[in-house]
Image: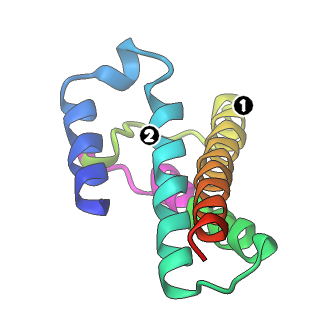
Amino acid sequence: MLAALMLTHRCLILNHTYENVWWTDFVMHALGGAWIAIVVHSFIPRSGFSALITIVLVVGGLWEALEFFISAPFFGVGEVRLTDPIWQLDTIFDLSMDIMGAVLLWAVLSRYNRVHA
């Protein structure tokens, strides 16, 4: 799933979809959060909800750091200005979508486990 997310991310950058379809970034971050929930659920099945949120915030924060500090074509970041308020707003929305995707998938996995236990 990670490879599919990374390939999709690269295609969205190459096709300038992030610039032309404003909500694409939200969807990708929600999918990224869902991927993190799958990984956490797979490797730490008994972990609690707070552990999931912490891991999502750490991984999402690392991704945001890459967006800020690596001016590479893969990330679609040109000239970085950390003082620009749009970066702060973008980070808040991105981390919120990471959490939303993880929470939604965590809820589905929890329900599935209760039904099939």
Q: Position of residue 70 (x, y in %)?
A: 40, 56
The residue at the point 46 percent across, 46 percent down is 31
Q: Is residue 82 above or below residue 41?
A: above
Q: Is residue 46 above or below residue 98?
A: below
Q: Which residue is mark 1?
A: 85
Residue lying farthest front?
Answer: 116
The residue at the point 56 percent across, 65 percent down is 37
Q: Position of residue 60 (x, y in %)?
A: 58, 59
Asked if the magenta segment contains residue 69, the reply would be yes
Part of the protein shown in magenta: 62-73
Label 1: element kind: helix
Q: Which residue is mark 2?
A: 28
Left or right placement of residue 57 versus residue 26 in this view: right
Q: Position of residue 21 (x, y in %)?
A: 40, 15
The residue at the point 81 percent across, 72 percent down is 50
Label 2: element kind: helix
Left or right placement of residue 1 versus residue 51 in this view: left
Callout 1, which amino acid?
Answer: Pro
Viewer-proximal residue, 28 or 17? 28
Task: Using a 10 Å C-alpha cutoff, classify the residue at mark 1 as few (fewer than 14 neighbours), some (14 to 19) or many (20 or more).
Answer: few
Task: Using a 10 Å C-alpha cutoff, classify the residue at mark 2 as few (fewer than 14 neighbours), some (14 to 19) or many (20 or more).
Answer: many
Q: Picture quarter containing residue 109? A: bottom right
State if disc 1 and disc 2 touch (CB < 8 Å): no
Asked if the magenta segment contains residue 80, the reply would be no
Left or right placement of residue 44 versus residue 49 in this view: left
The residue at the point 47 percent across, 74 percent down is 39
Give the mark, 2 or 1, whose residue is nearer the N terminus. 2
Q: Is residue 26 above or below residue 95?
A: above
